[in-house]
Image (cartoon, grey):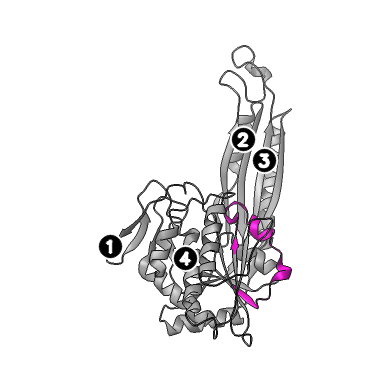
């Protein structure tokens, strides 16, 4: 079984966040079939695996997450060869789940290839298959780093072409703004009410969103409020997020939001606007000269996949692993439009990234 067939075989396994048991069992069963016995599941549901190798070589970690965003149940993979470059996509009712079943498939394929040589010449490996990556990196946050022997880690979870090496990621702040007004009958005494919806509208008209700078983005993603059409809405909640590689810019945007909240509150006498910001994860950056990058660049050049350093503007288990002291970069996996029904992966690039990882651990 090659990496493409292996990927197609695991894509149909349902794996929403919090329900990773089935895919974890498949991973463990497959690895045991290759002669791997050192597998543990922790309290967070993470699967941690040790793969033997040449004790004279450094241990390397490979990481992939086991959960996918919805809709990820009942996925039917379709191998589409009509294009000049064949792809795998879903039939259109669900995501594909290449994020991150592609990473899982590559890790499993690598272990099978190494097993054919009896694990005699490869670097010893640690495999970290995490839970809850898509809902706040919860598995990685609950992972016990004291058991790790690896010198550095490659996370097999990068959206984009093979050859991309993501060595930096942003900090993220989640924002919640609660507007509290006063309920009143909309027909009998509307003037007695204070509309939380109007307060929210005033906020949304002023709160900056979108790409505010090259390394600063913000989005308002959820607005919830109101009880009935004939009641002046007493409550409304606005939820959003901010991301930046620059802590000063992120702090400045938080301050701007707080200032706008105070200004709007002052315009609605008797109303209250309360804002909370919650740090989801801190930015990371691995310096270009680090061994984890230099080795990936050398292998990329050998395979002629044009290795290129890049920053990403998403959350990754790499954030947590780096924060906990393990130098980690994310490799481009050849999938595109993740988290959407249009998600697909290039067959050629899935093969190439598998070759790249195999050479990294040989």
- The residue to which callout 2 is attached is 200
Q: Of residues 204 and 241, which is closer to you in this image? A: 241
Q: Residues within 10 Å of mark 1 (few under 14, many from 20)?
A: few
Residue displayed at 47% across by 53% down: 13
Of the two numbered discs 1 and 4 on the same chain, state the one appearing first in sequence. Answer: 1
Spatial distance from mark 2 to mark 3, Cα to Cα? Answer: 9 Å
Residue displayed at 54% across by 54% down: 67
Is the C-beta separation of discs 3 and 1 under 8 Å? no
Spatial distance from mark 3 to mark 1, Cα to Cα? Answer: 48 Å
Q: Of residues 247 and 358, which is closer to you in this image? A: 358
Is 94 on the left-hand or right-hand side of 247? left
Of the two numbered discs 3 and 1 on the same chain, state the one appearing first in sequence. Answer: 1
Q: Secondary structure at mark 2?
A: helix
- The residue to which callout 4 is attached is 105
Q: Is residue 223 above or below residue 73?
A: above
- The residue to which callout 1 is attached is 81
Query: At which x and y percent is residue 352?
Result: 41, 74
Q: Nearer the viewer, mark 2 or mark 4?
A: 4
Of the two numbered discs 2 and 1 on the same chain, state the one appearing first in sequence. Answer: 1
């Amino acid at each position: 079984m090659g990496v493409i067939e292996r990927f197609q075989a695991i894509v149909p396994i349902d794996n929403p966040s919090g329900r990773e048991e089935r895919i974890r069992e498949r991973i463990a069963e497959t690895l045991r079939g290759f002669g791997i016995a050192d597998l543990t599941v922790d309290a967070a549901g993470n699967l941690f695996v040790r793969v033997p190798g040449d004790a004279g070589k450094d241990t390397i970690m490979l990481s992939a997450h086991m959960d996918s965003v919805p809709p990820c149940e009942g996925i039917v993979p379709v191998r589409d060869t009509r294009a000049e470059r064949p792809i795998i996509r879903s039939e259109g009712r669900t995501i594909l789940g290449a994020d991150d079943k592609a990473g899982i498939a590559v890790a499993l394929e690598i272990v099978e290839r190494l097993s054919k040589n009896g694990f005699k010449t490869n670097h010893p490996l640690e495999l970290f298959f995490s839970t809850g990556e898509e809902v706040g990196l919860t598995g990685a946050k609950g992972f016990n780093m004291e058991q790790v022997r690896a010198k550095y880690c490659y996370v097999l979870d990068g959206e984009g072409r093979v050859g991309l090496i993501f060595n930096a990621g942003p900090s993220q702040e989640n924002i919640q703004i609660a507007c509290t007004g006063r309920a009143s009958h909309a027909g009998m005494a509307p003037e007695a009410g204070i509309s939380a919806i109007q307060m929210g509208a005033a906020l949304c008209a002023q709160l900056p969103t979108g790409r505010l700078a090259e390394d600063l983005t913000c989005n308002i993603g959820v607005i919830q409020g109101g009880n009935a059409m004939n009641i002046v809405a007493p409550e409304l909640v606005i939820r959003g997020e901010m991301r930046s590689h620059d802590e000063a810019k992120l702090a400045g945007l938080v301050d701007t939001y707080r200032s706008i909240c105070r200004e709007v509150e002052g315009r609605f006498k008797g109303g209250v606007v309360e804002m909370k910001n919650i740090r989801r994860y801190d930015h990371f950056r691995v310096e270009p000269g680090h061994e984890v990058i230099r080795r990936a660049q050398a292998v990329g050049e050998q395979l002629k996949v044009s290795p290129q350093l890049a920053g990403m503007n998403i959350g990754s288990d790499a954030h947590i692993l780096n924060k906990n002291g393990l130098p980690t970069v994310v490799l481009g996996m050849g999938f595109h439009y993740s988290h959407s029904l249009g998600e697909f992966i290039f067959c050629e690039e899935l093969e190439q990234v598998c070759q790249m990882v195999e050479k990294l651990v040989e």
